[in-house]
Image: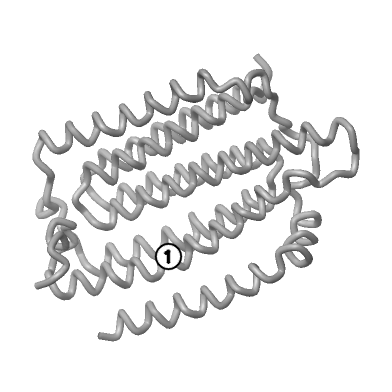
Amino acid sequence: MSILQILFFALSAFAIVSAIMVLISKNPIHSVLWLILVFFAISGHYILLNAQFLAIVNIIVYAGAIMVLFLFVIMLINIKKDSEPQKQFLVKLLGVLAGGSFLTLLVALIKQTAQIEGRQLLMKDGVIGLIHPLGKVLFTDYVIPFEISSVLFLSAMVGAVIIGKK
Amino acid sequence: MPIQYYIYLCLALFSIGVTGVLTRRNAIVVFMCIELMLNAVNLLLVAFSKMFHGLALASDATTTVGIEGQVFVFFIMVVAAAEVSVGLAIIVMMYRNTHSVDINFLNRLKN
């Protein structure tokens, strides 16, 4: 087993356990902290795939900005742990069953897909994850979507302020 | 590393997100599970981008085939950030009206 595989399996186990802990934590603040750990594990995967720009952006934007926003809102609205409504046991069981069947279905589908049979992933070679090639593509071929996304941000900001002011 | 490993990992993360949306009643936790699903898709996009890049790199050493996958991930992150800012504003407004973040209060869309 190479070091790459060991790192892959360790990060995967870390991500999946943290994701399950997001679900089963009663306190929403603990859910947020576990979700931050999931994001760090996914950033580790990006680094393994040599997608360095996305790894850093994932930490800065997701773990840094979005999760702090979540924490801020949770603390603002002061949810009490025991007042959080729980679904009935049957509904929970059915939800887990539905998610599990979804997973089983997709795994069965992937198992019999011939197109990906024996395809290998390039791990550390290749420069497409670095800032220079990504920036070049982003500011030449994708410059219009890039500018439109700034308009999207502006409208989201205006929308959030208008919704919050009422 | 076979591509199947990454597909199974992302399917597991996505299914955990789906299960969370189906089983939790706290709107903020439901929202976090949606973020989890978005991240699973992002990871799979990067994995496929590296797969196609590896295929093209064998014949041409300076190719940038597959970089679109990573650009799409960047745009997904942009849209997710905008979505979170509006969504959390809606949750705060809902809390002001009903003093709860229970999604069952929203099932009638009025009163």
Residue occupying the point 48% across, 42% down: B40
Percent of width and height locating residue A16: 42, 32
Residue at position x 42%, y 46% from top? B36
Query: Would you say A148 lies left or right of A23 here?
Result: right
Q: Callout 1: helix, strand or loop?
A: helix
> Between A130 and B7, which is closer to the camera in this rendering?
B7
Q: Quadrant of the N terminus of chain B?
A: top right
* Mark 1 crowdedness (10 Å alpha carbons): few <14, some 14-19, many ≥20: some
Is residue A101 found left or right of A123 in the rendered image?
left
Q: Is residue A91 above or below residue B88?
A: above
Image quadrant where residue A18 sits: top left
The residue at the point 35 percent across, 37 percent down is: B16
Using the image, name the chain to which the residue with label 1 belongs.
Answer: B
Say which of A23 and B18 sits in front: B18
For residue B53, side relative to residue A67 (left or right): right
Q: Residue B71: where, in percent of width, then height?
A: 66, 55
Q: Nearer the viewer, residue B44 or A10?
A: B44
Where is residue A162 drawn, in percent x and y? 34, 84
Task: Name the residue rendered at 79%, 35% in the picture.
Answer: A125
**Vertical arrangement, residue B38 with respect to residue B28, above or below:** above
- The kind of residue tagged 1 is Glu
Occupied quadrant, residue A45 = top right
Pointer 1: what residue?
Answer: B83
Q: Position of residue A47 (x, y in %)?
A: 66, 41
